[in-house]
């Protein structure tokens, strides 16, 4: 009874002892299938792609295209029109900086601008000195 139970059950493909051979793509793709192969509608295929490809007659009325030519067209189209993938937001430079908890929170730090440091030192010197302040712009 146990033997019959296992014999009646089929193994999933992943557990099969004899894997199926890979499915081969045909070298020639018929006119009706070529737009779907490239992921577009037939009107766009006829307008943008078909004039650039060699048509292969099949029988009295059939037309096919070489799959390698279709792949070549797709590679060329991608190189002319493709864009790099967008970076995930968490990898953007401005997202990795630590943020303050409150906008009113005061933090300490050092200015990285030497012109700001020079202006601050000059203002501090003028404020702490007992001399009268100079009005001339050259000071």
Image (tube, rainbow, N blue to C red):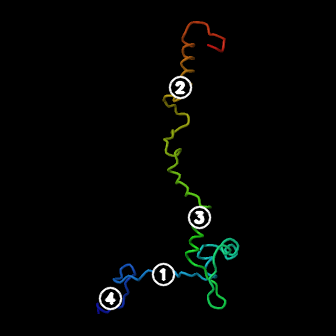
| The N terminus: image quadrant | bottom left
Residue neighbourhood size for the residue with mark 1, other residues' Cα within 10 Å, grouped as few (<14), some (14–19), many (≥20):
few
Q: Earlier in the sequence, mark 2 or mark 4?
A: 4
The structure residue drawn at horizontal position 53% and vertical position 82%, both measured from the top left corner, is: 26
Q: Earlier in the sequence, mark 3 or mark 4?
A: 4
The structure residue drawn at horizontal position 49% and vertical position 42%, both measured from the top left corner, is: 97
The nearer-to-camera label among 3 and 4 is 3
The nearer-to-camera label among 2 and 3 is 3
Checking the image for residue 110, the label placed there is none
Query: Percent x, y for residue 85?
Result: 55, 58
Residue wearing tag 1: 24
Query: Percent x, y for residue 34?
Result: 61, 78
Lateral position of residue 7 relative to residue 121, left or right: left
Q: The residue tagged with tag 4: helix, strand or loop?
A: helix
Q: Are marks 3 and 4 in contact (CB under 8 Å)?
A: no
Residue wearing tag 3: 78
Residue wearing tag 4: 6
Label 2 to label 3: alpha-carbon separation? 48 Å
Label 3 to label 4: alpha-carbon separation? 50 Å
The structure residue drawn at horizontal position 47% and vertical position 81%, both measured from the top left corner, is: 23
Label 2 to label 1: alpha-carbon separation? 67 Å
């Amino acid at each position: 009874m146990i033997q019959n139970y296992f014999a009646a059950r089929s193994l999933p493909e992943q557990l099969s002892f004899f894997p199926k051979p890979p499915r081969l793509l045909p070298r020639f793709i018929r006119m009706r299938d070529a737009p779907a192969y490239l992921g577009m509608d037939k009107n766009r295929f006829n307008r943008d792609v078909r004039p650039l490809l060699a048509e292969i007659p099949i029988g009295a009325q059939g037309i096919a295209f070489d799959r390698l030519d279709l792949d070549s067209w797709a590679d060329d189209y991608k190189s002319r029109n493709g864009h790099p993938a967008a970076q995930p937001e968490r990898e953007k430079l401005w997202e990795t900086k630590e943020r303050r908890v409150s906008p009113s929170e005061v933090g300490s730090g050092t200015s990285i601008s030497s012109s700001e440091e020079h202006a601050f030192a000059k203002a501090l010197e003028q404020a702490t000195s007992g001399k009268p302040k100079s009005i001339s712009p050259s000071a």
